[in-house]
Amino acid sequence: LDNDTRSKLQPLSGARIDVKDEHNLKDIECYVTSKLQGNDKESVVKAICDSAKGVFMYASEVVRQYNEDPTIDMNALPTGLAELYMDRYRRTFKEDKQLVSFHEHSKPMLAMLMCSRGPLPLEMVQAAVAGGGVVPKCDAWIVARQQHVEFVQRMCVGSLVEVGFLQFSHKSFPDWLEQNETFRVEKMEGEVLLGAACVKAVSEKDAASAGV
């Protein structure tokens, strides 16, 4: 864009927050203080705010995790937002040490979200099966998938989740997932899954229109 066009479009750009701004840091401190449960919160508040480094989403997630499990080591918090969420995965699915369930459930859903250009319907993401297979009908699979859906939802925009749509809430998630050795998610897998889901949706719509 030329400078004149860029100048005219500037008012339309989203608001920017300086994570190091004093007011932003104070707002996060007040939020953490108000949401933490239990007594003797001063040291915990400081640890969370220091680790968050001005990122509200990070502070909010640590608060949730701490309220669920006050034994969390505040001196060993992950350094980034994506790492923090995947640390939650390890603690939520403690028995999945070989990440078998991750590859079967969370990974295909995350892959689909990685390549989407906008919010996706929950039903579409929830039906993502590795390799493009058919969704199993057994109760155990359905229960496990729902648990992983709830995990994936935590990484998505809350207001969209409430109305049945999913979209990553932070741009660092897809970048980290694509590069991480342990939880690597291939964007190409998501492209394949999303393409298949779109074809299925169109076919079902055509069939409904034809009265099949």
Image (tube, helix red, strand yellow):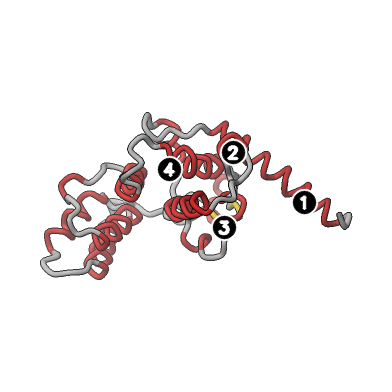
- Residue 180 position by quadrant: top left
In this view, the mark in front (4 or 3): 3
State the quadrant of the C terminus: bottom right
| Amino acid, disc 3 | Phe
The three-letter code of the residue at mark 2 reads Asp
Q: Which of the two discs, 2 and 3, sits closer to the camera? A: 3
Q: Position of residue 151 (x, y in %)?
A: 42, 52
Mark 2 or 3, nearer chain start: 2
**The disc labelled 4 sits on which kind of residue?**
Phe
Give the vertical position of 185 relative to 43 (above or below): above
Q: Considering only order in the chain, which callout, 2 or 1, is on the residue closer to the N terminus?
A: 2
**Tag 3's secondary structure?**
strand
Q: Where's residue 73, x and y in %?
A: 17, 50
Q: Whole-Å distance between the Cαs marked 4 and 2?
A: 31 Å
Kindly identify which residue carries mark 3.
165
Mark toward the viewer: 1 or 2? 1
Name the residue tied to disc 1.
Answer: 204
To which quarter of the image does residue 122 belong? bottom right
Give the residue displayed 28% in from the left and 66% down from the top: 31
Can you identify the residue that label 4 sits on? Answer: 173
Q: Earlier in the sequence, mark 4 or mark 1?
A: 4
The structure residue drawn at horizontal position 23% and vertical position 58%, both measured from the top left corner, is 69
Q: Which residue is denoted by mark 2 in the rendering? A: 2
Q: Counting other residues with Cα less than 10 Å from the Cα at mark 2, is it few (<14), some (14-19), or many (20 or more)?
A: few
Above or below, 27 relative to 117: below
Q: Are marks 4 and 2 in contact (CB under 8 Å)?
A: no
Can residue 8 be seen in the rendering of this structure?
Answer: no
Instruction: For label 4, count other residues whose C-alpha is less than 10 Å away and answer few (under 14), some (14-19) or many (20+).
Output: many
